[in-house]
Structures are given as structure tokens and as C-alpha cells.
Image (spheres, helix red, strand yellow):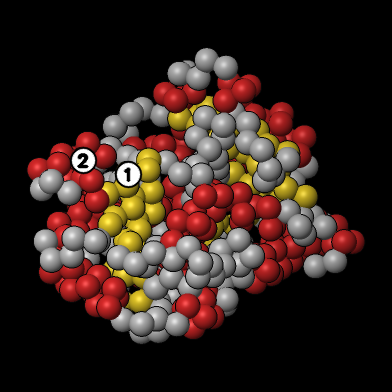
Amino acid sequence: MNSHSRKKLLIISNLYPSNWLPNKATFSTQQFSNIARYMDVSLLVPISWLSWVKLKNKEQALQYPGGVENLRYCWYFYTPKILRSTYSLFMVFSLFLNSFFWIRNQKADVILASWAYPDGVASAILAKLLGKPFFIQVLGSDINKYADKGWREKQIVWACNKANGVFSVSQALKNKLIEIGVQPEKIHVAYNGVDHKRFTINTLVRKENSLLYVGNLVHDKGIMELIDAFIILSQSNDLLRLVVAGDGKMMSEIVDKLREHNIINKTELLGSVSHSDIPMLMQQATTLILPSYAEGLPNVVVEAMSCGTPVVATNVGGIPEAVNENTGILVDPRDVPQLTKAISSVLIKEWSAEEVRSQAKKFSWDTYANVTVKEMIKASTDNQLKKNST
């Protein structure tokens, strides 16, 4: 992947932060920035038209410092809550309507969709119309949510099998794709990386009896099971504290339950937190807790491990590919007694921060870029050779 082999890549993904939502999918900035070390990247970010019309100063709201420089935000139309199996067609129509000339001017050699539906399916149609090779990156929630045996699943399988390749963030997710009908030879496991310089050990700030949750406050993240476990543990451990870094629709329910049990004073509800502040929170915590019902392989787990912080997480998706007996404890989802016992165990065990961190070192952005970029450059080169021969 030297300088003379640089190709032009168009990425289409709804997962990218802005000044309006600065903490949305910050892992995407890391993914795309690392790809941009080897390819000339243009990024198109479709935004719900319902959100778009609410933005009064779009030029100011739809910017993001750092990351990809050649960046365009655009609206995409769809019918809320109905006709969901047609959202991919709505997206293709919207992108052609508001961004066709911009897309054409990028002169991309290859297209990457980072999210299976509707982005991946829409990109498959777009790539066909433009005569470009394309790839789909699946992240976990997109497959777990939309692989529902309905039309959306059929569209995802169709798009993945039409793609030149599919990048999966874990082996478990690859297995799920194969299970729903994606050709195994299409799928490449590309683990997300970690910035090990930022996410590092700092023993001077570590606190005892400090639990940390980082993520959206939604039902499927198991946040209420964590609150229930915290309530139980607080009865026998008055020093126990819970730090919640994240926001979401369940915030009010969480506050009400903490107040009901008179332990809100033991909890820090930080709301949405900048990614730059996450390393310190992880370095301070005794353990990170992630009781999700389904995952790909969440960055937050590996980032905590890179800080030498053991984790308690559910045995779902690709999490077991990162967490072992030397780095944390795995539990079943939706099981409050098991979660409570695991948190109690992780608090009393003596962990080697260096050993926890060593497991995280295999998750590298260099490795991620080598897997993804290698395949995309090969596909674009083969496509050009094919055109030249005809």
C-alpha cells in the first residue's frame, strides 16, 4: 500500500459525527481517518430529512473538526414508521436528487458503505449504476436489528453477495452473515482498532468500588439490568459508585429508579460525553460494565482493556473474542443475579492491568486498515484492468 497505488474511495454512511451530534459514532472517524492514510477518501453522510428540516444553520451544524476532509452531509427522505423495507430505494432516490453531481465529481474508484441497511443496499444499487466495485462494512447492530427474516434481510443478503467484499467487525458477526445466506468467501473479519496511546494505563487515578457504563441509554444495552444489579450491591457496599457516560430515552426511567431506592447520590449521570474524555473515565474505573443483549464487537470493551481496566460484559456477538478470564467476566444477557455476582467478583479480584492491556494490543488500526484497504485497492485495480481490456 505505497503512495503510487492510492485510489479514490467514496464512503457512504449515516454513522458520522457533526457539530450537531459531536459524540455520534466517533469510532467512524477513527476508521475512516485510518483508511485515508492509504486512499483519497470522500465521505457522504445521509441524514434523516426529519432531522435535516430542524437544523436552522445547517452549514454550522453539519461540520465536524478532524476526520475526513472531503465531507458532505445530505438529507434522505423516507416514510416514518411505514414501508421500512423500501428505505434503501428512498435513499438511492434521495442521493441522486441532492448529491448526484457531487458523487460524480469525486471520480471514485471504489465505494464503501459502512452500515448494512439502508446504506449498504443503496450503495449496491448506486455502484451498479456507476459501474464501480463496492464493499459493505457491517458493525453488529445493523445485522442484529435487520436480519429479521423479512424483506430487509433479503435485501442485505442480496447486497452483500453482490459486493466485492464484506468487512465484519468480528468472527461471530461473520458467522451470522453466513447463517442468513451471505457467501463465506465474501466476508473478511476486520477488527476495529484502538488508539493505544490515548487509551493507556494510569494507576494514579484508579478508584476503588467504581463501576463505569459507557453507551447509549437504550433497552437493548441492558442498562436497566445494570441499575438493578447496582441497587442490590449498594445494600452491602456503601462505598460503591456508578458512573454512567451516555444519554438516551431511558434517562428519566433510570433517574426515577435511583431516586426510588435512594441511591442517586451514589451515581454520576454524565450524559453524552466527548470521546476525548472517555480514556480518563476508563482509567479511573475499577471495572467497565456492558450488559448488552446483542453486539458486534464494541470498541468500548477493548478501549477499557487498553486502559488496564477489567470488564464485565455479556457473552454475545464478538465480545468473547476480546474478553477472557484474564481480562474480565462474561455473563448471560438479561440475567440480573448473574450480573450482580460477576460485578461483585470483579471488584474483589486482583487484576493485572498490564495483562488486561496486553489482550487489547491485538486490536490495531493498522491491522484494520491493512485488511480493508488491501481488498478495496485490489478490487479497484481489477475493475480498471477489466475496463482497459474491453
User: What residue is drawn where x is 52% and y is 50%?
Assistant: 277
Of the image marks 1 and 2, the number of the one nearer the N terminus: 2
Q: State how far apart marks 1 and 2 are (Cα).
A: 9 Å
Residue 54's image quarter? top left
SS at circle 2: helix
User: What residue is drawn where x is 28% and y is 57%?
Assistant: 241
- Quarter of the image with the N terminus is bottom right
Give the class, few, some or many, for how many residues have Cα within 10 Å of label 1's Cα (few <14, many ≥20): some
Q: Amino acid at mark 1?
A: Leu
User: What residue is drawn where x is 30% and y is 65%?
Assistant: 209
Comparing 348 with 328, the one in front is 348
Comparing 27 with 76, the one in front is 27
Q: Where is mark 2, residue-wise?
A: 255
Q: Is residue 133 visible?
A: yes
Residue 165's image quarter? bottom right
- Coordinates of residue 254 in the picture (x, y in percent): 21, 44
- Label 1–label 2 contact, CB within 8 A: yes
Q: Where is mark 1, residue-wise?
A: 269
Q: How many marks?
A: 2
Q: Amino acid at mark 2?
A: Val
- Coordinates of residue 172 in the picture (x, y in percent): 40, 72
- Coordinates of residue 381 in the picture (x, y in percent): 79, 62
User: What residue is drawn where x is 45% and y is 56%?
Assistant: 281
